[in-house]
Image (cartoon, rainbow, N blue to C red):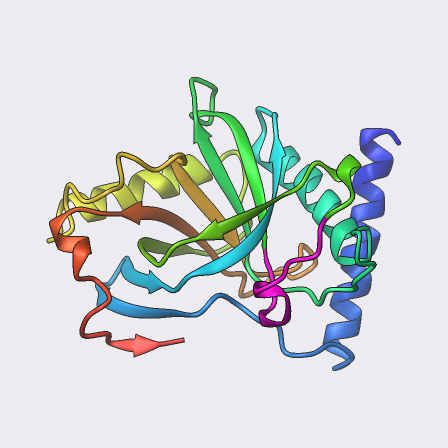
Amino acid sequence: MTKSSLKNALMVILLVITIACSTKLCKAIESPQYKIVHSESDFEIRHYRESVWMAAPVNEISFEKATRNGFHRLFQFIQGANLNFSRIYMTKPVLTSIVPGAGPLHSSAYFVKFYLPDKFQADPPLPLPELNLQPDPWTSHCIAVRKFSGFARDSNIVKEAEKLALSLSRSPWANTTASTSEYAYSIAQYNSPFRIIGRVNEVWVDVTGSRANGCESNPIAAY
């Protein structure tokens, strides 16, 4: 399958999902649960509980191409391309984690991730080997989050990550970004590509250190 035909097939798939959900044919979409423990005008700190995701590694320079490639493989997995032949409901967000590198987007590779619904958290279906997917178990940890609108593109994700870094440097959470994290940052996308208005994206950065050690205490809100 050529790159253009792969892109077209993925767009058709996403259009079907969008139409189905707009006509109430799909269930409420699950998301990983978290508590907000610190909030400012341009970012917040969330404490995420333990969870399991399915990850698609992608070697690609372009964030957009990597996300399409990884999501295409993940979509096959949730449509039954697993050893259990399980059909898995769509969740949100689709998360693209950037592995640090020297490329134009400060990346050498990406991991595109799908949050597994509660039904499959304890016993994730095994993906078919040719999809090159791997379970990604998360421990309970804290994440700094910045929201931004529009589409997440190669042209804007680095700028949004830099804005989050600047906000953190001016806050009580300065110097708490996780130096041991294997990812520079992640981009969370919550909407179908067919939604034009009211789009929600986020930059995620892991935080650690003395400030983050107690980040799960005194939550402001839970989701």
Q: Identify whether 48 is placed above or below 137.
A: below
Farthest residue to the front: give it. 123
Farthest residue to the bottom: give it. 24
Image-based side of 181 in relation to 153, left or right: left
Image-based side of 125 in relation to 176, left or right: right
Image-based side of 208 in relation to 210, left or right: right
Q: Residue at x 35, y 54 (%)?
A: 146
Residue 81 rendering spot, x and y as whole percentages: 81, 51
Q: Residue at x 22, y 47 (%)?
A: 208
How many marks on residues? 0
Q: Identify whether 160 is placed above or below 222.
A: above
Q: Residue at x 16, y 51 (%)?
A: 173
The image quadrant of residue 18 is bottom right
Magenta includes 108? Answer: no
Chain part drawn in magenta: 115-126
The image quadrant of residue 100 is top left
In this orientation, which residue lies closer to the viewer: 180 or 95?
180
Residue 58 rendering spot, x and y as whole percentages: 62, 31
Magenta includes 121? Answer: yes
Q: Identify whether 80 is placed above or below 203.
A: below
The quadrant of the image that shows the N terminus is top right
The quadrant of the image that shows the C terminus is bottom left
Q: Identify whether 123 is placed above or below 108.
A: below
Residue 98 rendering spot, x and y as whole percentages: 47, 35
Residue 189 rendering spot, x and y as whole percentages: 54, 54
